[in-house]
């Protein structure tokens, strides 16, 4: 909308000069152009054959921030060391689990023994109370007979 007044003023200026309408310059908006893309060199293939000499450590020294210095490739000694560390960690975890199972088993045995002892005491008390009830019935019926 801001372009409209400019067109009118240019058109009125041309028409006021008295020149023919065919001689009027045609005003166009500038056609936008896309900026050119910068050219890049190809990085080359990232996949190399397994038996290629380009794979593995090289004599080149990479800086600490270079991505190539952070390669996940490991030597067989590194893999063996990692395997031994993993097995040792699993042995420690297994030993800790076995120890906790032994503690749980000992606790279960202690609770079972306590339960058996309380159950035996309960049976003894039930028999004792039953015997007391029987003797009280006998003495109650014997006391009624005397009267």
Image (tube, rainbow, N blue to C red):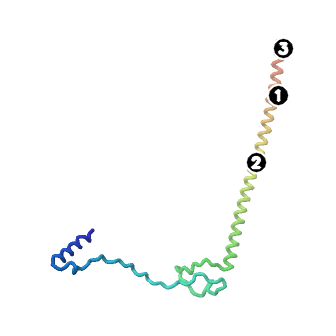
Residue at which label 3 appears: 145
Q: Which numbered disc, 3 or 2, marks the residue that appears first in the sequence?
A: 2
Label 3, label 2: how far apart the Cα atoms are: 53 Å
**In the rendered image, the vertical position of residue 90 relative to residue 139, given as above or below:** below
Q: Residue at x 47, y 84 (%)?
A: 40
Dot 1: within a 10 Å radius of its alpha carbon, few (fewer than 14), some, or many (20 or more) residues? few
Q: Which mark is residue 131?
A: 1
Residue at which label 2 appears: 110
Task: Name the element at disc 2.
Answer: helix
Looking at the picture, tell me which residue is in the foreground, 139 or 97.
Answer: 97
Q: Residue at x 76, y 44 (%)?
A: 114
Residue 141 image position (x, y, % from top left): 82, 18
Looking at the picture, tell me which residue is in the foreground, 138 or 58.
Answer: 58
Query: Which quadrant would residue 12 be assigned to in this image?
Result: bottom left
Q: Which mark is residue 49?
A: none
Residue 32 image position (x, y, % from top left): 35, 77
Task: Name the element at disc 3.
Answer: helix
Q: Which numbered disc, 1 or 2, marks the residue that appears first in the sequence?
A: 2
Q: Residue at x 76, y 42 (%)?
A: 115
Query: Which quadrant would residue 129 be assigned to in this image?
Result: top right
Task: Name the element at disc 1.
Answer: helix
Q: Quadrant of the N terminus?
A: bottom left
């Amino acid at each position: 909308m801001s372009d409209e007044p400019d067109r009118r003023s240019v058109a009125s200026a041309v028409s006021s000069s008295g020149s023919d309408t065919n001689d009027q310059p045609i005003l166009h908006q500038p056609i936008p152009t896309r900026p050119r893309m910068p050219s890049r060199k190809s990085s080359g293939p990232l996949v190399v054959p397994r038996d290629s000499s380009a794979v593995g450590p090289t004599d080149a020294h990479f800086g600490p921030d270079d991505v190539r210095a952070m390669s996940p490739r490991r030597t067989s000694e590194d893999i063996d060391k990692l395997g031994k560390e993993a097995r040792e960690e699993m042995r420690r975890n297994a030993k800790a689990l076995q120890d906790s199972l032994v503690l749980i088993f000992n606790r279960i045995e202690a609770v079972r023994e306590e339960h058996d002892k309380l159950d035996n005491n309960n049976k003894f008390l039930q028999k004792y109370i039953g015997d007391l009830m029987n003797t009280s019935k006998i003495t109650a019926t014997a006391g009624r007979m005397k009267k």
